[in-house]
Image: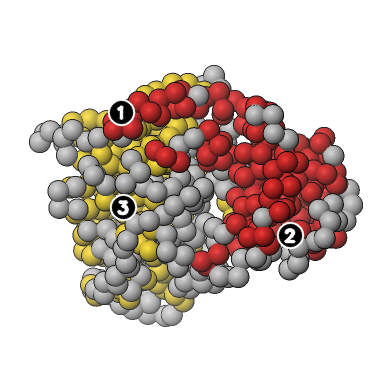
């Protein structure tokens, strides 16, 4: 993410509903086998995000939105595998009203407590068994205000809406296991009023008019995706298509108000993606593109998978390089916990430095020196953001990029560029932690780099010498 300004106002409201369906016992046989899955995965910064006891493989979302009223009608079909004997399991959902739920076609009891939705199936689910949960819901989705004052979730725009979800806003428009450690494929079907378009992640597989003149679009994202990277843009868009890397479809959608001023850079997306593959390895997804909104609808850019979103003023070359680099670092390789966010932002920031080195006659060393001189970069170690509100602070970006530059200085260009491409290949479509990264770098280096990690990655003090 490149958060230059996030200036919306909103608040998170809690909706409490209790719906009962089916039996509330622990199984048809009368014996208690399973136990409830955990509410939250105990993330060090967001302990209540995500849920335990299962692993999602696919979300199939069927949505209908009316911008005039702000109402969203949704049906979420979640295919998952139990990782324990389950008597009940939780889903994260912010706001919205749940109308009912089933598990494997049978009605399930539903309990709502704040942002936690608990489903109790008619029969226990065995460890290792695949199951399908379906939740129907509706209401006016919320804009979520994060602890750092930034806004995400469901943002109403001048002509529709935009859903963005880092770190937790995706729970404002569909129920799920909203932690990056549980990635899944997505099929998103959206119906909108006549004259509007719905743009999401992945490949557009069909678009048709309904009997009443509305438009239904179907999007398929086959590669695993963390829920915070899911997006949905609804409104009036000018769309363009192209091809990148020989076979990868490119789809960009832009608000007509800012179409002319962004046209030249949008046309360069395939060229920049080609440069990225030369440095970071094969592109990890089946599609690419961008969504560009007006500044008064969105105040920042975000690396939503396959189709990053931008405000018009954030849509510049450096930010496009940043968000495209995230497709490898953050999207394909997602953070194991939110404390590992520096692995996303350091690589994306360093991609900006590399691009400037290749095309703008600015050596990465120069950007390293500028970052080193920035006292804000030393507020805390990049691998140890102390609070949730520090998730997107300067150390995560700038000092994180300094860590990468020090690796380059220590190991030389050959080993460094091997790491740039090898790291996302090693954990392609998975998740990884800081410890995974340091082990990987040391395996390439063939030696211990403890001093480098102690000073640059975990150290509390700014070193006197930038080569220490």
Mark 2 sits on what residue? 457
The image quadrant of residue 281 is top right
Residue 336 seen: no
Distance Cα–Cα, label 3 vs label 2: 35 Å
Q: Report the colour scheme.
A: secondary structure
Residue 101 image point, x, y percent: 27, 63
Residue sticking out furthest to the left: 212
Residue 465 seen: yes
Mark 3 sits on what residue? 155
Q: Nearer the viewer, residue 316 or 195?
A: 316
Mark 1 sits on what residue? 238
Residue depicted at 66% across the width and 43% down the height: 350
Relative placement, left or right, of 254 versus 83 is left
Residue 165 image point, x, y percent: 42, 54
Split into 4 quadrants, where in the image is the C terminus? bottom right
The image quadrant of residue 301 is top left
Residue 114 image point, x, y percent: 33, 74
Residue 210 image point, x, y percent: 16, 34
Q: Earlier in the sequence, mark 1 or mark 3?
A: 3
Q: Residues within 10 Å of mark 3 (few under 14, many from 20)?
A: many
């Amino acid at each position: 993410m490149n958060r230059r300004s996030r200036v919306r106002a909103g608040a998170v409201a809690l909706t409490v509903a209790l719906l009962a369906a089916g039996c509330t016992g622990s199984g048809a046989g009368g014996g208690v086998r399973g136990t409830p899955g955990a509410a939250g995965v105990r993330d060090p910064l967001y302990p209540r995000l995500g849920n335990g006891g299962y692993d999602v493989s696919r979300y199939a979302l069927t949505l209908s939105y009316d911008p005039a009223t702000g109402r969203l009608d949704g049906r979420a079909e979640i295919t998952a595998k139990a990782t324990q004997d389950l008597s009940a399991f939780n889903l994260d959902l912010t706001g919205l009203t749940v109308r009912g739920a089933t598990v494997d076609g049978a009605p399930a009891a539903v309990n709502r407590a704040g942002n936690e939705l608990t489903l109790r199936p008619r029969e226990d689910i065995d460890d290792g068994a695949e199951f399908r949960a379906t939740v129907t819901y509706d209401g006016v989705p919320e804009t979520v205000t994060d602890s750092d004052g930034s806004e995400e979730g469901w943002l109403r725009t001048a002509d529709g809406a935009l859903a963005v979800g880092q770190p937790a806003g995706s729970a404002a428009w569909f129920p799920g296991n909203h932690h990056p450690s549980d990635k899944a494929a997505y099929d998103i079907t959206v119906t909108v009023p006549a004259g509007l378009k719905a743009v999401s992640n992945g490949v557009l597989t069909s678009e048709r008019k309904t009997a009443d003149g509305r438009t239904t679009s179907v999007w398929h994202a086959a590669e695993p995706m963390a829920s915070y990277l899911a997006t949905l843009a609804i409104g009036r868009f000018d769309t363009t298509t192209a091809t990148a890397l020989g076979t990868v479809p490119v789809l960009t959608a832009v608000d007509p108000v800012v179409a002319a001023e962004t046209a030249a850079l949008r046309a360069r997306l395939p060229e920049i993606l080609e440069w990225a593959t030369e440095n970071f390895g094969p592109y990890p997804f089946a599609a690419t593109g961008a969504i560009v909104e007006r500044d008064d609808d969105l105040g920042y850019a975000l690396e939503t998978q396959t189709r990053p979103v931008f405000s018009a003023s954030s849509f510049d070359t450096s930010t496009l390089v940043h968000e495209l680099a995230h497709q490898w670092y953050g999207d394909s390789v997602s953070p194991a916990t939110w404390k590992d966010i520096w692995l996303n932002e350091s690589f994306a920031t360093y991609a900006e430095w590399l691009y400037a080195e290749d095309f703008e006659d600015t050596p990465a060393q120069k950007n390293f020196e500028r970052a080193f001189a920035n006292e804000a970069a030393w507020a805390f170690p990049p691998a140890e953001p102390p609070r949730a509100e520090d998730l997107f602070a300067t150390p995560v970006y700038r000092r994180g990029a300094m860590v990468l530059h020090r690796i380059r200085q220590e190991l030389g260009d050959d080993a460094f560029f091997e790491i740039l491409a090898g790291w996302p290949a090693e954990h392609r479509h998975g998740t990884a932690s800081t410890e995974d990264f340091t082990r990987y770098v040391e395996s390439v280096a063939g030696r211990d780099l403890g001093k480098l990690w102690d000073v640059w990655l975990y150290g509390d003090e700014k070193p006197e010498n930038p080569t220490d």
